[in-house]
Amino acid sequence: MAPAEKSTPQPERQKETPKPLLNQDTALVASEIHLRSYIEAALRAILAVSQDGRIVFMNGHTEEIFGYTREELFGQDSAILLPQRFRAAYAAALRTYFAAPSVRVLGKDIDLAGRRKNGEEFPIEIGLSYVQAQDGVIALGFVSDITDGKRVRDDLAHANAELRRSNADLEQFAYMASHDLQEPLRIVTSYLKLLDRRYQGQLDAEAHEFIDFAVDGATRMKGLIQDLLTFSRAGTRSADIHNVPAEILVQRAVENLKAAIEERSAEVTWDQPLPQVAADAGLLVQVLQNLVANGIKFQKDGAAPRVHISVGAQGSEWVFSVRDNGIGIDPRHAGRIFRIFERLNASDQYPGTGMGLAIAQKIVERHGGRIWFESKPGEGSTFSFSLPPTGSARAATARER
Ligand code: ADP
């Protein structure tokens, strides 16, 4: 074997691994350029603060939102970016932060404010982080101007409060108006009836017919006022929600409709057994009664009304359904029928005030549920409403409202 020194030396170069595109220094510079471009493009003010509270670094957005130039801020006490009243607390918070630096967000639960060079204050949120530099920890603050978000939230809260107030006013008005209208209407009706009786034989037939029209109108108005009163009471009186057997609610609703059921030879049936539900019994009987009454009323000429009530669990809710074999509803009118005084049919064919579904909806929503219907014109309708499960948070909230 030939001695090693005699072997042909391999050129050094061939053993080298391929050269990186950039050496380590250039890579570092590149990554810093990269980082800087991110920091500069950020839509937040990014500031680095040393342990004595001085600003040692900031991005362009800091200039924009605080109105100072970099030259003015560099080396300054970072407290100048806060309103005077926060500065002492800030100095203390900074000491605590440097004792145990961590990553967290300030301003989510408390109202923090920044202060621009022109003295203007604005709401801010601060994300805090830190880096370990050669001569100690540097705190990094990521400051967002949340003026727009806060304004939207404040406006929304304000609009909500306004809406609640005007709703309450409206309900109060409807209640007072319908309550106070009852008495004068009663006087009108009773004097019309007196006129009719006392002047029998003295007035001609036409006069008596006019009196009948007036009594009719007053009676219809009485119905409207009573429904309006029921509607506003459903919104104003506190709901008395307890666990009740649905069987009792259904029985009571059917009992209240006994006259209509007999008159129309209607058949009203329901599932057995029915569950316990969380409800204000009086209010829920009213809902069932309105839905069953509609099922009996909106029928094809001469048809025998058949109405079936079922209750089933859907997800975590109870869903009541009232199915009829009536005239059905064109789905185009879906948005209308739950509004007050809305009716789709002529009142001489199907009498009513157009309040039944509005009352039902209000009561169901008071219970924390929803109401809807499915129907095919000519083939009947199914009105359904949901109730939160007994003992649920939603049932409890409905109880407290
Ligand atoms: P009312 O029964 O006094 O007319 P509602 O508010 O109960 O008022 O109902 C509003 C309208 O919705 C009714 O006038 C009718 O046109 C339609 N409607 C309600 N329930 C039914 C039903 N079961 N079948 C067909 N149409 C219905």
Image (cartoon, rainbow, N blue to C red):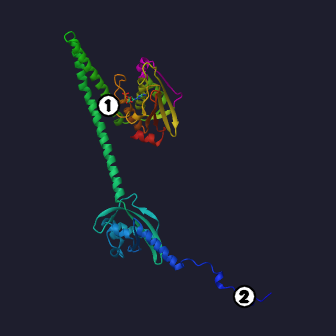
Residue 150 in which image quadrant = bottom left
The stretch of residues the image draws in magenta is 255-274
**21 shown above or below 66:** below
Q: Residue at x 47, y 72 (%)?
A: 34
Q: Secondary structure at mark 1?
A: helix
**Residue 371 x %, y %:** 43, 35
Say what amino acid the circle numbered 1 marks.
Leu
Q: Position of residue 396 (x, y in %)?
A: 44, 41
The image's mark for residue 228 is 1
Name the quadrant containing residue 237: top left
Pointer 1: residues within 10 angstroms few (<14), some, or many (20+)?
A: many
- Does mark 2's beta carbon lie closer than 8 Å to ligand 1? no
Q: Position of residue 258 (x, y in %)?
A: 42, 20
Q: Residue at x 32, y 44 (%)?
A: 163
Residue 265 lies in the magenta-colored region: yes
Quadrant assignment for ligand 1: top left
Q: Is residue 239 visible?
A: no
Q: Extreme left residue here?
A: 202
- Which residue has dot 2 on it? 8
Mark sitting earlier along the chain (1/2): 2
What distance separates the C-alpha of mark 1 from that of mark 2?
110 Å
Q: Residue 108, percent across and down?
A: 40, 58
User: Residue 294 colored magenta?
Assistant: no
Residue 31 in sight here: yes
Q: Quadrant of the C terminus?
A: top left
Number of the front mark, 1 or 2? 2
Residue 212 against residue 82 in the figure, above or below: above
Task: Indicate if the residue with disc 1 has its beta carbon within 8 Å of ligand 1.
Answer: no
